[in-house]
Image (spheres, rainbow, N blue to C red):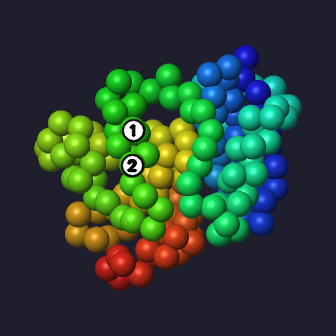
């Protein structure tokens, strides 16, 4: 059974869920608690019960510190076991993209099998269940345009602004 904590941040409602192995889903800010519940449910396709554990409390504090500009890295056990082997490979590469840095889908693809995997990388990045912690928002198009983001482009812009990298992209 998964456990989750849903909470308000200065950015909106957020949620984090865990399994026995570690944090398995993060729902980035939305306007309602119900939207977060829906995001957490679809992240793993399993129900969860609301409750707080030491690990969820630590993850919540780390995320809140990040959103307030006080944290640049995360330290929490992750459970990505529901991803495919290819997705997990992509997510491991994403974990190596440092705060304040942008990389392209092709850059990721060249590290997981070749530049011709850029579209498949895009799909794996979009399926990331742990946005921000596995920093998919730092991945942009090869032409320095914003690219996509499963949590919406306004959220991607806000995260890149927080990290000081939005100005490195070409204007859209």
In the rendering, at what x and y percent does residue 114 appear? 14, 41
Q: Determine the residue positioned at 59% across, 49% down.
A: 74
Q: Is residue 172 visible?
A: no
**Residue closer to the observer: 80 or 35:** 80
**Element at label 2:** loop
Q: Residue at x 62, y 22 (%)?
A: 21
Mark 2 to mark 1: distance in Å?
7 Å
**For residue 20, above or below residue 27:** above
Dots 2, 1 in contact, CB < 8 A: yes
Residue 63 as seen in the image, left or right of residue 74:
right
Is residue 75 rendered to the left or right of residue 117?
right
Callout 2 environment at 10 Å: few (<14), some (14 to 19), or many (20+)? few
Q: Residues within 10 Å of mark 1 (few under 14, many from 20)?
A: some
Horizontal and vertical percent for residue 11? 72, 65
Residue 126: x percent and y percent? 43, 45
Query: Viewer-proximal residue, 120 or 115?
Result: 115
Residue 37's place in the image compared with 33, above or below, is above
The residue located at (18%, 46%) in the rendering is: 110
Where's residue 117, x and y in %? 20, 41
Q: Is residue 151 visible?
A: yes
In depth, the one of 73 and 128 nearer the eye is 73
Q: Tell me the SS state at disc 1.
A: helix
Residue 102: image quadrant is bottom left
Residue on which disc 2 sits: 96
Q: Residue furthest right?
A: 51
Comparing 150 with 74, the one in front is 74
In the rendered image, which quarter contains the C terminus? bottom left
Q: Which residue is mark 1?
A: 92
Q: Residue at x 47, y 62 (%)?
A: 99
Residue 85 falls in image quadrant: top left
């Amino acid at each position: 059974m998964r456990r989750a904590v849903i909470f308000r941040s200065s950015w909106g409602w957020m949620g984090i869920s865990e399994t026995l192995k570690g944090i398995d889903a993060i729902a980035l800010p939305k306007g309602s608690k119900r939207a977060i519940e829906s995001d957490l449910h679809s992240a793993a396709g399993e129900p969860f019960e609301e409750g707080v554990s030491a690990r969820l409390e630590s993850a919540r504090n780390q995320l809140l510190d990040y959103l307030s500009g006080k944290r640049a890295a995360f330290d929490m056990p992750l459970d990505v076991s529901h991803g495919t082997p290819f997705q997990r490979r992509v997510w491991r590469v994403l974990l190596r993209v440092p705060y304040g840095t942008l990389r392209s889908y092709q850059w990721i693809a060249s590290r997981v099998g070749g530049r011709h995997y850029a579209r498949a990388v895009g799909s794996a990045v979009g399926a990331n269940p742990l946005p921000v912690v596995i920093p998919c928002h730092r991945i942009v198009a090869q032409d320095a345009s914003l690219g996509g983001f499963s949590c919406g482009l306004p959220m991607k812009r806000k995260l890149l602004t927080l990290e000081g990298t939005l100005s490195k992209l070409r204007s859209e």
